[in-house]
Image (cartoon, grey):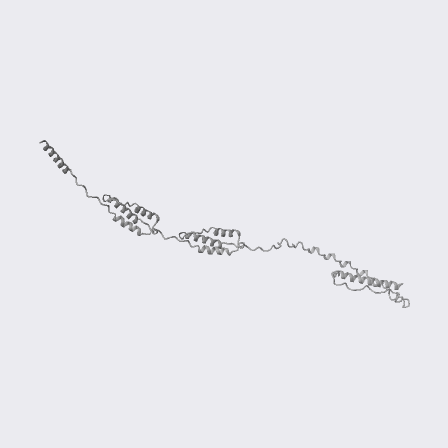
Amino acid sequence: ANEQAEVDAMAKAISDAIVALVEAPAPIGDADYKAVDALVKVVEALNKDDYTAESWKVLEDAVNAVVRGKKADEQAAVDAMAQAILDAIANLKKATAPIGDADYTAVDVLVQVVKTLNKDDYTADSWKALEDAVNAVVEGKTADQQAEVNAMAKAIADAIAALVKVTPTTPDTPSTSDTPSTSDTPSTSDTPSTSDTPSTSDTPSTSDTPSTSDTPSTSDTPSTSDTPSTSDTPSTSTPSTSTPSNSSNSPQTGDSGIVVFAVLAVLALAGAIVAVRIRH
C-alpha cells in the first residue's frame, strides 16, 4: 500500500507538470528589409554632382546608418532606417550651374587704348587719375560679379574722357618791358634846335658893304694913263664857289646862306680895296 501511494504521487507530479507546460513561441524570422533595399537602389541611381554637398551628405549618412540582420521582432527599427533614407532623398537640393568667369572684354580694350596714349601730352593730375583707374582692375571675377567688372571699365573710360591736354609752351619772347621804351629814344629836345643855327642877324648886314659913296666919282678917277696897269691891280679872283658835296658833312640850309653872305662880303671888300688903290 505504501508503494502505491508513491506511484500515485509521481503520477500526480507528472500530471501537474503537463498542465504547467507552456507552448513555446514559433521561431522568429528575419526582419523585412525590402523598403530599405528599394530606397538604397534609388540613391545609387542618383548623381552626386547634381546636388549640394550638404544635402547629399545627409543622404549618405542615412544609407550608411542601415544595420542588416535585424529579426522580425526588430522590424520597427528596420522601418525607421527606411524612413530616414526616404526623408534624405526628399530633402536633396539641386546644385546651381557652375559659375563662369566674368567678361573683361571692355576692360581689356580700354587698357589697350591707354597704352596708345602719351603720358607727356596730358597734365600730371589727369594722368594720375587714369593710372589709378587702370591699377584698380581686379582680375578673376566670376559671372555673378560682372557688375563689379563693368564698374572698373567705366572708371577707366571716365578717366580717359577727363584727360586734360598740356598747353604747349611758347619760346620765351622779350617782354614789352625789355623793349626800349620811347623814353630811351632820342627826344626831339636832343636834336639841334633851330636856335642853334646861325640867325640871319649874324650874317653881314648890307651896311657893312661899301656904300656907293665910297666908290670914286668919275671926276676923281685918274686918267687912263694914271690907272695902274692891270698887272698892278689886285686880282679879282674870288674864292672858289664850288659847293659842298651832299655828304653828311655838308652844311645845312642855314649854313649855305651864311657862306653866300660871306662871299658877297669878301667881294665887296675886294672892290673897296681896288677903289682905294685907284684913288691913290
At horizontal 78% and vertical 61% (from top left) the residue drawn is 259
Q: Quadrant of residue 258?
A: bottom right
Q: Nearer the viewer, residue 70 or 125?
A: 70
Which residue of the protein is positioned furthest toward the left in this rendering?
Answer: 1
Q: Is residue 19 above or below residue 50?
A: above
Where is residue 129? Give x, y as percent: 49, 51
Q: Tell me: 220 left or right of 244.
A: right
Q: Position of residue 83 (x, y in %)?
A: 27, 47
**Quadrant, the N terminus:** top left
Q: Position of residue 142 (x, y in %)?
A: 41, 52
**Farthest-out residue, bottom:** 224
Residue pictured at 27% horizontal, 49% vertical: 37
107 sits left or right of 34 in the view = right
Quarter location, residue 107: bottom left
Give the vertical position of 228 relative to 174 (above or below).
below
132, 144: nearer the viewer = 144
